[in-house]
Amino acid sequence: MSATRGISSTLVGRSGELAFLDAAMEELPTALLVGGEAGVGKSRLIREFLQRVRQRRGAEGALALIGACHQISAEGLPYAPFSGVLRRLVRQIGVEGVTALLPGGSPRGLARLLPEFGEPDTESGTSTARTRLFDHVLLLFERLAEDRPVILVIEDAQWAERSTRDLLSYLIGNLPPGVLAIVAFRSDELHRTHPLRPLVADLDRIPWVRRLELDRLPRRAVAEQARSILGRELDPRLLDRIYERSEGNPLFVEALLGDGRIEGELPESLRDLMLGAVHKLPEETQEILRLASAGGARVEHALLAAVSGLDDAALSRVLRPAVSGNVVVVDGEAYSFRHALLRDAVHGDLLPGEHARSHARFAEALEADPSLVPPGRAPAALAFHWYSVHDDTGALVSAWKAAWVAKEAAASTESLQMLDRVLDLWKKVPDAQERLGVDHTSVLEAAIEAANVAGETDRGIAYAREALREIDDPVRAAGILEQRARIKIKLGDATVLDDLHEAARLVPAHPPSLPRARVLSTLAQRLYLMPSGRDEARALAAEALAMARAVGDATVEAHALITLAGCDFDEGDAERHVAALAEAVRVSERGAADSVLLRVATNEAHVLEGMGEHERAAAAARRGIEAAGRHGQARTSGSFLTMNLAEPLFALGCWDEVLELVEHALELSPPRLTRISLHWLIGCVAVARGDLDAAADAVAALDTVRASSSSLVQDFFPPERLRMDLRVAQGDLPGALDVVDYVLKELCLCASPRYGWPVLASAARACAEAGGERAAGLLGELRGQASRTPVRVRIQQAYALVFHAEAARAEGRSSQSEWDAAAAEWKALGEPYSEAYALLRAAEAAGKEDAAARLHRAAELAHSVGAQPLLEEIETRARRVRVSIGPRSGDDSFGLTPREREVLRLIAEGRSNREIAGALFISAKTASVHVSNILTKLGVAGRGEAAAVARRLGVG
């Protein structure tokens, strides 16, 4: 059996793993996490699998895109594997072909990954730019997979930097139909603190993600590998020795067997094994390999030629033995060591002088001609090489440049790493300020902002503390305090106001300045959310508005207008508030940041939901998502907009959609305080549907993220209401009363009618369910709170009716008329679950004839939202009073959920999965899951048959 020099011509011992990969190809979308120690054969297995796919499906049957992480990536090369993937894709379909697949036919969203796509779009270095980049990558794979399956391979993920890890997490978490993602990594390097380890653990919990761990080969497989390499059976004693020394690692077996002969004694160290093939090469080839090892796992041909001083022909001649000997492989216009271990071994074998000279030569070549590497890569590469030779000045300057390049690529984590290095080297370079053109505090300010965007809150606060210690300029100190305050807001830190008030004190009121306008605007934004802060917020926002207009800053002007609208908000006149927000939108058209439009959408949806205008609130949130979509953020418009959309949808009974939206938002790792509302929504749906374990998990998750120092009522009132409802559902009535007692002692419910009335209603219900002397005492206190809580809008009136009806029920005098009034309010508001509950309680207080109609209507409503516990209670009551609630309209024998019936309607209209996803504001992956579930429930083979069933059911 012939073999490539030193390598088995057949893949041995991996039939089970190949079958696993083959099966995954038939169950798309799927993501595979392929782990194994270095040299165990991960890359070989994947190459063999791709070859099998080509053989079975033909050259056009599937699109394979391969990218690799490089060890230098940790030094500041963000998204390296995805840049490689895009470069290969451009080679296949051209820049025009890729552009045609992107939103609006514009490739600028991907320009941070590949310069062929032109200049990056605006807002570089912000979370918005990062989100837009992620969405463009996801959409690209969705479009590619519409025509044929796509196989994405990311190799050596153990070297993935933060930005690559985040993009991988996002892509796999939203994996489009028709895509197989394979992520390979050295599992033996994932020590306890390795950054890839938590990502692997998180991905492993996603239903369509599977793990494949490659073990070492057994002895019989090593024998087969040796036979394939040598073309003959190996002497059993030598085989034993090889198996003992290699421990079944295929790469080590190859190194031991060498070029087909067993020569002398076996090497005593693995480094010797790795270097054995290198030492057999000509000396001039070994010299070039030693030089190339300093360049990383992949070195461009032009760069290596410049560093070595050889022309193209000479370099090709010198490297040819390394290519023939499978030490180096050609990778486009570059060379890679066949295995990273080879590069490690060669680089580790350099003498100290060789090490310094090699890295210095790379740095000097790149300084002379940065075009020797892909655009934008030179600063990071220079930072790596100058740092390796302890050239502090060169490392400082290049790290500073690399930090800004990373910021432009929306890679804040890598930017922060480079800024860390700049700060570390600052004291070692006496003229650092002259070299960079900025002072030390400016670097700290950049690091604070990078840490804020990257979510590294603790580091951001530490940098701010250091900056404040060394700064003398009060205006500049105010800016740093404002930066720190924005980070503290994400943490729910109660000292936010201390920072902002001090910042306002430090910036002089005259002359008008942008720093003061910005500080006052941020302070006003924070204050107006607090029950007692509106008057001060109004005055500060007015001052910020005047100052922003004086200095001509549209962003601060628009934010000040939004804050003023909030301060002057009258729950009885929502239209005036909406008109005020429209003025902020008009101001934003003069060049304000996207944050203005997102805040407008958030505020409008929030206000309308507080009025009980659920449909309008949802529409406002959807408009915000659509506006973000025009900037490439259709699915990830921000966790706050998701929350503002999910809350009215919950009230409207669209619970499946709520769960889809919330789970998607949580995948984006939103700020801690935002996660409170997301977990609250999950818990509310779970309690109503009877999934008490999931509800308890949601409450536990909520408790882990809630900051005790937060002063916002929305961070405390809804969670305590959920806790009460859960304990009632669990039958833990003493525990429910404990929560009521806590609420009465710790929360001032009358301070916020919007959030206070729902808590009062749930607390009264807990007292009604528990009964007894303790409940009666608590109920009296609740009545006192209710008497001090105003009713300003219709939804508050509905909760007030429920409170008084529950209080009467707790006292043994449940009133049909009170419950009927509450049911009528909930019906007018469009809240099916609340209406059904009120109808059940009205039926309990009614006679048999009056009860029948109420129970029938209640059962229909409970069934429509999947509220099984309430439905069972309704059915129990119907049996007790011996009334028939009859068949429910829209009932069918297929068990479709309301959300699935909505998807079925779109299937009947001929919509594709992507069109369904766009219509319902969900991911294509979620749409695909719905379609699969529907086909299974209907027992049909395809969409055409499903459409026929839909017409028969009257859907569509």
Image (cartoon, rainbow, N blue to C red):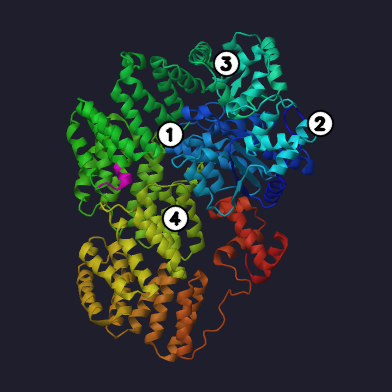
Q: Where is mark 2, residue-wise?
A: 2
Q: Residue at x 62, y 55 (%)?
A: 928
Tell me how far mark 2 sits from mark 1, CA to CA.
48 Å
Tell me how far mark 3 sits from mark 2, CA to CA.
33 Å
- Label 3 vs 2, first from the N-terminus: 2
Along the viewing direction, whichever of 552 and 65 lies nearer the viewer: 65
Task: Report the span colored magenta.
Answer: 488-493
| Helix, strand or loop status at disc 2 | loop
The amino acid at mark 1 is Thr
Q: Residues within 10 Å of mark 2 (few under 14, many from 20)?
A: some
390 relative to 746 in the view: left or right = right
Instruction: Estimate the x, y position of residue 793 in percent, counting from the top left.
Output: 31, 64
The amino acid at mark 4 is Leu
The reply to whether callout 4 and callout 2 are in contact (CB within 8 Å) is no
The amino acid at mark 2 is Ser
* Residue 292 visible in this rendered orientation of the protein: yes
Q: Residues within 10 Å of mark 4 (few under 14, many from 20)?
A: many
Mark number displayed over residue 291: 3
Helix, strand or loop for the magenta stretch, by majority:
helix
The quadrant the C terminus occupies is: bottom right
Along the viewing direction, whichever of 671 and 307 lies nearer the viewer: 307
Mark number displayed over residue 645: 4
